[in-house]
Image (cartoon, rainbow, N blue to C red):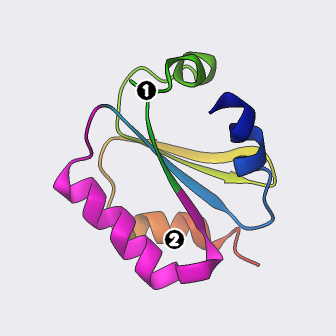
Amino acid sequence: MMANFGEIINRETPVLICFYKDELSEKDMKTISDVAYILKNKVYIVRIDITKNKPLAENLGITQTPIFSIYHKGELRCEHQNDIEAIELMKLLQQYII
């Protein structure tokens, strides 16, 4: 995953990454689904289980989940730990949508 991570975050479109452990909660799944439905092809969404991607999680300093990270053109633009409403996440993403 680490080799692909650079490719994933180096996109022109914003990238929303949800880091989780073992399983996403229903609330987090709904948040991601809502964002994906409303923003459709404007945002690239990835879910990463840190228990299956330990080297990546360690490299990024991620120990607790969920963490919602927004990357744009290879740079971390915003990070939110714990639950967040879809509307708030979409507001954060809007500023990077071309």
Image: 39 above or below 89: below
Image: 61 above or below 97: above
Q: Main secondary structure of the magenta part?
A: helix
Q: Earlier in the sequence, mark 2 or mark 1?
A: 1
Image: 90 above or below 72: below
Residue behind mark 2 = 91
Which SS class for mark 1? loop
Circle 2: residue type = Lys
Residue at image x 45%, y 83%? Answer: 38
Residue 51 % position (x, y): 38, 24
Residue behind mark 1 = 52
Residue 79 % position (x, y): 53, 43
Which SS class for mark 2? helix
Task: Examine the image and state in which quarter residue 49 appears.
Answer: top left
Report whether 24 appears left or right of 78: left
Task: Examine the image and state in which quarter residue 12 appears.
Answer: bottom right
Give the magenta-colored segment's residue range: 22-45
Circle 1: residue type = Lys
